[in-house]
Amino acid sequence: MAMSETLREKLLLEYTEKHMGKVFYFCLRKTSDRYEAEDLTQDISLNVILALEKEILPDNFSAYVWRIARNRYSVWADKKRKKEEALSPCDIYEYEHEIADSDENILENMIRREELALLRRELAFISSDYRNIVVAYYLENRSIRDIAGSLSLPEGTVKAKLFRARNILKEGMNMAREFGKRSYNPEDIDFVNFCSGFGDNGQPWSILTHALYKNIFLEAYDNPSTAEELALELGVALPYMEDELEFLTKETFLLKTGNKYETAFPIIGKEAQDEIHEYNLTIISDLTRLIEELIDGYANACSAHGIDFYGRYQSYEDAKWTLLIHTFDKLMAEAAGELNHKRTKRPSHGEWDILGYKKTERSYNGWVGRHGSITHKNVLNAETIDFVQFKFMYKGINSKTPPFLSYDESLTLKRLAEGKTEGLEETYLEKLVKYGYAKKSESGYTPAIVVFKGYDTSNTLEKFTNGEKEELKEKATAIRKLLSSASVYAMNITKKDLPQSFKKDERMCSLACNNTKVEAGHLMHRALLDGWIKYDENTSKGMGAYLYI
């Protein structure tokens, strides 16, 4: 009886769904070798397909399949027998033993524990397109029609994906998969954040602290990778990796092109950092000494002329922590050219950019971060507040103040510094006292940080003598010369280190090059060695914070 195309497809599907698994375990029992069993199963399946193409409808399809299986096993056994010198009678005639097709427990009885382990492993590394269908069909016992309906796919597409999934799983089970080095030896990254406004959920820092994310960034940096490749390298099951990659792409930390992911920000390598570091060590002693002398000279001149330039809310010894880094930042900007870098708008109202640094083996002298206050998001043309907190990664100083001030807290601090204390909320004032940014006495609240009045220092300099001005100018020129040479050197090394994708992006290349220079942490460390700045239990809690009014 001739078969229609529809009937042939139905029988092929019946073979794939009901018989192929049993055939494999029939072959596995006969050969006692998984790889030979797979080859024999392929041979039997091919012969079943070829037989159906002859358009002859068998009376009993199940018996028909097992007849082909036994015949192909007989051929296999004969070939094997010819290659071997001797086999036992049991081996020669083993193929004549029939397996009852009605034995519903055949799979459970024959599956090996190691096979199940391999299958579970591969299910963890097959993409969701295939995995969802395999799980639904084999583990949830859902029909093709039901799966197709739930996924809004044609039944033929589900069948094709199921067939492809089997091949992928088989290929994977034959592979000697090994997890990458990052699965057991994760690396770390330091980050610099350039922020006009944090995201509603604390982005980017709420994300940058995760070890998994850091190693995704490192692995995908200048190395476009699929979800499967990243999952294997980091030793994370694909369902979880896919979810994390989707999240990081949505948050703009990763770029996705086709099915590959790549890190969306520069990460400066260890060799580049070490090369820049070695150069900076040659100038850091002279640079720090000159900046110390410049600040002391300016302070002495201001004192001689009755000028209060840093607010006097802190002792000069405490204020020097702020003045050191603040002066360094200003002179560095003048030497290298201020980076006119508008922050990138991000999800959840954030405006920020980040730069990563691979952890190096060299000794760590401390890091100085630069935090501020949150930009007000709900009020149009809100008042600008120029508040900065240098975060010193030294003896836990950075942990004594909050990561940033809220808009209301920083506005309260500004009003306090302006002397406009009427109507200030007690809640915010008490928080500022807790942070070390304000003091409370019987007469009321006062700031406890450095407060600068205006940005222009020309009026102050006019009151200095020519000798004072000349001495300050000479030191500032020498500092700028050192910083300029260091900046040019660092920019050349950094640009060479960047991958082509960032070299072509003028904006990101500029961001990376302009922020890989002399580190403020080295300056802090040298000033501590000089004894110019000191830290003990009496040092102000709000050290490193300043405000412009």
Image (spheres, rainbow, N blue to C red):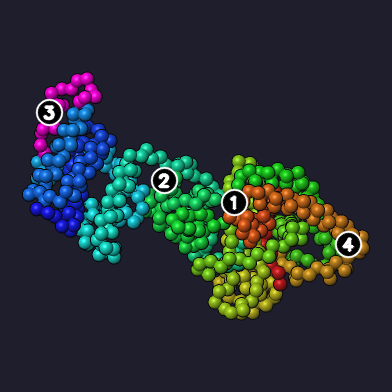
Q: Work out how far the residue at label 1 is from the one at label 3, CA to CA, in angstroms.
A: 65 Å
Q: Work out how far the residue at label 2 is from the one at label 1, CA to CA, in angstroms.
A: 24 Å
Residue 305: give x, y in percent of width and height. Answer: 87, 66
Closer to the eye: label 3 or 2: 3
Closer to the eye: label 2 or 1: 1
Magenta extent: 81-99
Q: Amino acid at mark 2?
A: Leu
Q: Which residue is mark 1?
A: 499
Q: Work out how far the residue at label 1 is from the one at label 4, CA to CA, in angstroms.
A: 46 Å
Question: Dot 3 lies on which element?
Answer: loop
Closer to the eye: label 4 or 3: 3
Question: Dot 4 lies on which element?
Answer: helix
- Asked whether the residues under the numbered discs 2 and 1 touch, taking CB atoms below 8 Å apart as contact, a structural biologist would say no
- Asked whether the residues under the numbered discs 4 and 3 touch, taking CB atoms below 8 Å apart as contact, a structural biologist would say no
Q: Amino acid at mark 1?
A: Pro
Mark 1 and mark 3 lie on one chain; the one further toward the N terminus is 3
